[in-house]
Amino acid sequence: MVYVTITGMCLSLVPIVAPEMKDHFGFSASQVGLLTSMFMLTTSLGAIPMGLAGVRWGGRVLLASGGVVVFGLVLFAGVASYPWFVVARLLQGVGASAGPPVATALMAQVVDRRYYGWTLGAFGCGQGVGVLLALLIMPSIQAAAGYRAVFLATAGITIALVLASLARKELRARPQSGRPAVSLAELVRSVGAVAANLRFLLLAVVNIGAIGLFVGIIAWTPPFLHDQRGTSLAVAAYLTAGLGLAQLLGSPAGATFMGRWGKERVLVVGLSLMLVATALVPFAPGVVGVFVCVVIVGFLTLALLPAFLGLVPEVFPRPDQVGPATGYMYTVNLVATMLAPWLFGVLLDRYGSGKGSHGYIFGYELLALLALLGLVSAVLFILTRKRVVGARLQA
């Protein structure tokens, strides 16, 4: 949960400093969006290597990755050119990439199956905590001392969280799998088995839709409220923080929904509601209407996480495949999580961001299409599961 909190914080920083970056350095909307995309690029690409490393070295991988995040944050605060900003964001993404694959593999090994769903719910709360910390604390720091102070403050919070996590002996110990350490060849074969599993690929596309939409919402809702609804940037960030609070509530609620109605039904209903809420954001009346739509999206994003992660061990019952599978899932997320914020910025550059312009309308409808992609894949996943169960019964 601590490491998902760090990821949520880092993801939320660029919208807070975006106006300063535009005014001080003359960056375009697409360049600002690309800074979020670069973070998601290495967060996605690093997931498989981190998942494999987690199988061999366990939670200690998380401790090392926290140091990489801190280095990337300090570097961003210490440079003043766009190429170096990109490098710093890439490093932050490398460090953040360890969180989900290593943590889910660790949980699969140490958590009793009876409590696994609730553990996933608590784990997902970290995303909401991170967004809340960033969007509630950092706007004041930015207003008082600029973007450098924002990234240095985030580095300090990250150091405190990493040091606090040292209290858990599971993060300091090697994985207790009851068998010899997995060889590199076995790890590669595990990734190959993951990549060849059609049902898991459908599940990964479901996650692409939800996560890509979430990244786009986080990156562009504060500027949208500022440009289209006339709020100050600080107020826009505080309102968007409602998304983080909704996520904080959504994760445990999702674990409850999963136990009551089943994982598949939670995915289908949740993605359907996300599709509608996202499509309505640019047309919602006033600030309150936008806030309601964004809160719904935030709640549902994390409400889906326990159901989604809970299906991974069902597709891959072997514990040594859970980490690589989760890492592979976050790698294929690259398609949406990198492109969504950048393409949103491209649409703003092309169609405008001021009142009377249509850039934000096209941007939010692009995000809604991601939810539609996830919804279609969820339906296909359910259909293939029924086919697999039917074939097993016949056998």
Image (cartoon, grey):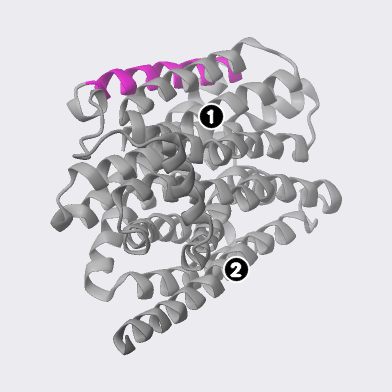
Q: Looking at this rendering, what residue extends furthest in the top direction?
A: 78
Write down the residue under mark 1.
94
The image quadrant of residue 394 is bottom left
Q: Nearer the viewer, mark 1 or mark 2?
A: 1
What amino acid is at disc 1?
Val
* Magenta span: 147-166
Left or right relative to 57: residue 36: right
Which sits in the foreground, 95 or 321? 321
Q: Which residue is mark 2?
A: 373
Q: Is residue 377 above or below residue 312?
A: below
x and y percentages locating residue 301 in the rendered image = 44, 57
Tell me where residue 134 sits by quadrant. top left
Q: Secondary structure at mark 2?
A: helix
- Give, as a three-letter code, the residue at label 2: Leu
Which residue occupies 33% across, 28% down?
57
Viewer-nearest residue: 14 or 316: 316
Q: Residue 131 location in percent, x, y?
A: 44, 39
The residue under the point 55% across, 31% down is 93
Whether residue 333 is in magenta: the answer is no
The count of marks equals 2
Between residue 43 and residue 142, name the one nearer to us.
43
**Which is nearer the N-term, disc 1 or disc 2?**
1
Q: CA distance from mark 1 to mark 2?
A: 27 Å
Whether 148 is drawn above or below 52: the answer is above
- Identified at 60% across, 37% down, the residue is 232
Give the quarter of the figure containing the N terminus: top left
